[in-house]
Image (spheres, rainbow, N blue to C red):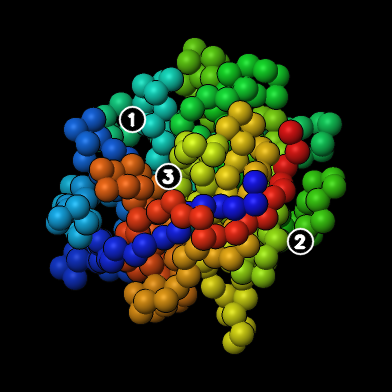
Amino acid sequence: MSVVPYRFERLGVVMSPDPDDPAEAEGTLNPGGAVTPAGEIVLFPRIVTDGNVSRIARATVTFEDGVPTGVRREGLVLKPDRSWERASDHAGVEDPRVTRIDALDRWLMTYVAYGPLGPRTALAVSADLIVWRRLGPLVYVYDDDADVELNLVCNKDVVILPEPVAGPDGRPALAVLHRPMWGEALDGRELGRYTPAGHDGEGLSIWLSYIDLEAARADPRMLMVLSGHREIMKPEQPWEWTKIGAGPPPIRVQDGWLLVYHGVGPTGDGGQVYQAGAALLDADDPGYVLARSKEPLLSPESEQERVGTVDNVVFPTALLPHETGLLCFYGMADARIGAARLVRSAGHVGSAGGGAR
């Protein structure tokens, strides 16, 4: 396949900081999202208070004539109140992604816990999208054959596919995309550009790992244990040259798994810009990339996307079905939340390639 047949249609801002709420003083951004059993869209925005301390809230999206135009705030669901979510000079629970796993009859939330060792991805689980139970930070099983030790480095942009696939051993598994941050140790020290064997250390790539489904059914703590690691997508184009990372959890479409991802590249004035593209992953083996964007599908263009806490950022984190189509919710300049509709179109050419079967 040589085409990623999708494009974005902007729908506007759906959530901005409440000027009367100190908890939102430094931004509302990067929400996870889910569809409730009643069909409502609920977001889990990262809200940032003074001192850059992040919490995760809940907000139901409100619509006018089928267009998302605002939210109804419904309080907090997670605060950095565990020992591994806070340190003496920083704290935070950040950038959640939410996946409904029918095979477990649960929603899973991955989020970044900013604690004593810096940023680590953690997992929480919910049966009702209201009460969330923390399971703790993710653990990556050491791969002796490939000499990959992911527990040494920070890891972000972790998303879980909603349907089981065959793992490396043929057993049913949950596929997990993530982005190791080579050179950044969990305690903040430089690692001398630590990279696993066979990796050139250039750019930051998307990796695939697996959770054993039957083990997780028997013991929910096994949801935190990932194995079978392999790199599947490297930066290719100038707009994503610095790093790429998964956006929302992939969604099943007729062509396979649709992954919206962000890419970070340089600007002409020495800065950097976050943009969004898309890739199609094989339905049976999501480690095989069928096609991906040559050009970004969403770039910072509006003032809300270009100017904010961090300028020039569009950062998609939720992609949800709605009666009007696929709705994408994304962070705008690390300050507010926008919505866009992802429309199937034959107008965007991609490049084949990626991980091998």
Ranked by sequence position, the earlier of labels 3 and 1 is 3
**Are there few (<14), some (14-19), or many (20+) residues within 10 Å of tag 3?**
many
Q: CA distance from mark 3 to mark 1?
A: 13 Å
- Residue under numbered circle 1: 126
**Are there few (<14), some (14-19), or many (20+) residues within 10 Å of tag 1?**
some
Instruction: Determine whether the residue tagged by mark 3 lies in a helix, strand or loop.
Output: strand
User: Whole-percent x and y of residue 357?
Assistant: 74, 33
The answer to whether residue 107 is visible is yes
Ranked by sequence position, the earlier of labels 2 and 3 is 3
- Residue under numbered circle 2: 202
Count up the numbered dots: 3
Amino acid at pointer 1: Ser
- Residue under numbered circle 3: 97
Amino acid at pointer 2: Glu
Whether pointer 1 and pointer 2 mark residues with C-beta atoms closer than 8 Å, the reply is: no
**Residue depicted at x 55% and y 37%:** 256
User: In terms of depth relative to the viewer, which is nearer, 131 or 328?
Assistant: 328
**Residue depicted at x 38% and y 67%:** 332
The label number, if any, that marks residue 331 in the structure image: none
Q: Can you tell which of label 1 and label 2 is closer to the viewer?
A: 2
**Residue depicted at x 39% and y 73%:** 305
Q: Is residue 328 above or below residue 337?
A: above
Instruction: Determine whether the residue tagged by mark 2 lies in a helix, strand or loop.
Output: loop
**Are there few (<14), some (14-19), or many (20+) residues within 10 Å of tag 2?**
some
Q: CA distance from mark 1 to mark 2?
A: 37 Å
Amino acid at pointer 3: Arg
Q: Can you tell which of label 3 and label 1 is closer to the viewer?
A: 3
**Residue depicted at x 40% and y 53%:** 343
Whether pointer 2 and pointer 3 mark residues with C-beta atoms closer than 8 Å, the reply is: no
